[in-house]
């Protein structure tokens, strides 16, 4: 059976359900589509570091596939356009892909299911649990994390699938698409490259070599430092690293070395990721609407001067400036940094949270639709936070996390105060 394997956020060989479902093919064509984020609020395309990390991951995957006699074909066209064309050109009998996470991807899948001339098989995505393993119907998923955690903590995480040692042969004479070359280099403060082998190396280093997970609860709120947090998220976001494999290695560490409050806390972080993943499927379009999944009306506006100052790291808040400079240059920001920067845009500057989420989407090398938009809604008070939003005292956060100003100076956060400007009727919040 001629099979087309359509890779989305599963750019790896280990624990890849879609790849395993393709192993019985007579001939196999492996395709992925370069993402083309829709322009929104002047945030067109992807930032250089996000492009770089994805391109490296695609090159790495193609290298691994070449060792098994296969090739990764990368298309710049949308799946809606390229997949029907490939099905017709190469007489494909079936397409296999993984479960999409959010609204736009689900719409694409529904369109293809209606229009393709061959079956489309959908496997699980990069999740800890299959939907059938969840202790509730997906539509009844808890609205908040704590009850979600209480219900899943006794569930068994699915076992990772083994890395295949052989693949079906490629369809002859296919010449389609080239992997884009990286457009940037990793910054010296975050010298991580994309690709499955790099993700697995980082996993071994942080958990077993450095055993940094032992101190995770104490170090996780640091603004920088390569071992203060795991930084697995870039590989998890594009599926170059399996979250089930991460959970399996964490459990192995606890059995062979020790289990403490920090290892438990790190597992909570994997559950947070899982929570946002499944909520994105249920919330659909509401994940991107101004009133969010909580349907809470918050008076916010788009004031272009305030938004531009925030994006450029040119506000009256030095720590926020430093965080924004770090994001654009490296493609990464710590979790605590994201909370501070998001709170500033929403609460101090009064800007609609969606503009900040879109800017993060453009630049983050670990952009994950559910986690990104879910966390922004959480801060803005229109999402999964039972407290109705979070406002971080920037002065207090600076005293706690950068008391000597080292981080702020490193990332050029101290800027001249901006002059006040007159607010007229056009600047009023839209109710």
Image: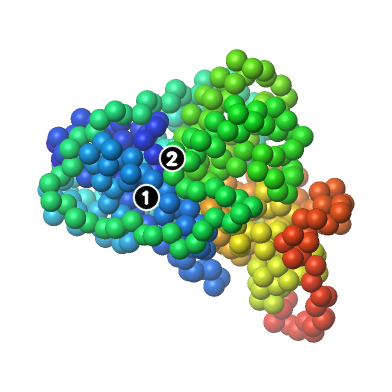
Q: Quadrant of the C terminus?
A: bottom right
Name the quadrant containing residue 74.
bottom left
Q: CA distance from mark 2 to mark 1?
A: 10 Å
Left-right relation of 40 to 267: left
Residue 286 in the image, given as x and y percentages of width and height: 54, 53
Q: Nearer the viewer, residue 172 or 39?
A: 172
Residue 31 visible? The answer is yes
How many numbered tags mark residues here? Answer: 2
For the point 36% across and 35% down, which residue is it?
13
SS class, disc 1: helix
Report the residue marked by disc 1.
59
SS class, disc 2: helix
Nearest to N terminus: mark 2 or mark 1:
1
Residue 196 disc label: 2
User: Please, is residue 283 above or below residue 184 in the view?
Assistant: above
For the point 44% across and 29% down, which residue is it?
130
Residue 398 visible? The answer is no
Left-right relation of 404 to 267: right
């Amino acid at each position: 059976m001629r099979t087309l394997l359509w890779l989305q956020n599963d750019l790896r060989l280990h624990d890849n359900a879609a790849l395993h479902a393709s192993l019985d093919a007579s001939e196999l064509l492996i395709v992925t589509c370069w993402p083309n984020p829709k322009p929104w609020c002047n945030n067109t395309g992807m930032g250089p570091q996000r492009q770089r990390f994805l391109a490296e991951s695609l090159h790495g995957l193609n290298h691994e596939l070449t060792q098994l006699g296969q090739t990764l074909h990368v298309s710049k066209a949308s799946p809606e356009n390229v997949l029907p064309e490939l099905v017709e050109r190469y007489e494909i009998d079936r397409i296999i892909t993984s479960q999409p996470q959010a609204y736009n991807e689900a719409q694409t899948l529904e369109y293809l299911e209606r229009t393709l001339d061959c079956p489309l098989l959908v496997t699980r995505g990069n999740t800890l649990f299959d939907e059938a393993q969840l202790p509730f119907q997906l539509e009844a998923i808890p609205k908040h994390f704590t009850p979600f955690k209480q219900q899943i903590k006794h569930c068994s995480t699915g076992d990772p699938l083994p890395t295949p040692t052989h693949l079906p042969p490629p369809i002859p004479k296919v010449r389609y698409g080239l992997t884009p070359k990286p457009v940037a280099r990793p910054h010296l403060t975050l010298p991580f490259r994309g690709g499955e082998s790099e993700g697995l190396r980082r996993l071994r280093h942080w958990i077993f070599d450095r055993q940094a997970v032992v101190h995770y609860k104490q170090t996780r709120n640091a603004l920088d430092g390569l071992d203060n947090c795991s930084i697995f998220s870039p590989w998890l976001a594009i599926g170059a690293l399996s979250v089930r494999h991460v959970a399996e290695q964490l459990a192995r560490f606890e059995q062979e070395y020790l289990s403490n409050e920090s290892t438990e806390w790190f597992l909570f972080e994997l559950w947070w990721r899982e929570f946002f993943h499944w909520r994105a499927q249920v919330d659909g379009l509401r994940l991107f609407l101004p009133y969010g999944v909580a349907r809470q009306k918050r008076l916010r506006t788009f004031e272009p001067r305030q938004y531009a100052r925030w994006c450029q790291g040119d506000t009256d808040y030095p720590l926020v400036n430093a965080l924004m400079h770090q994001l654009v240059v490296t493609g990464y920001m710590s979790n605590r940094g994201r909370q501070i920067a998001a709170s500033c845009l929403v609460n101090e500057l009064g800007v609609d949270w969606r503009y900040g989420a879109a800017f993060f989407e453009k630049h983050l090398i670990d952009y994950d639709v559910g986690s990104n938009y879910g966390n922004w809604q959480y801060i803005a008070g229109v999402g999964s936070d039972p407290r109705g939003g979070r406002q971080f005292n920037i002065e207090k956060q600076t005293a706690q996390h950068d008391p000597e100003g080292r981080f702020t100076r490193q990332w050029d956060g101290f800027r001249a105060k901006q002059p006040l400007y007159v607010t007229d009727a056009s600047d009023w919040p839209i109710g």
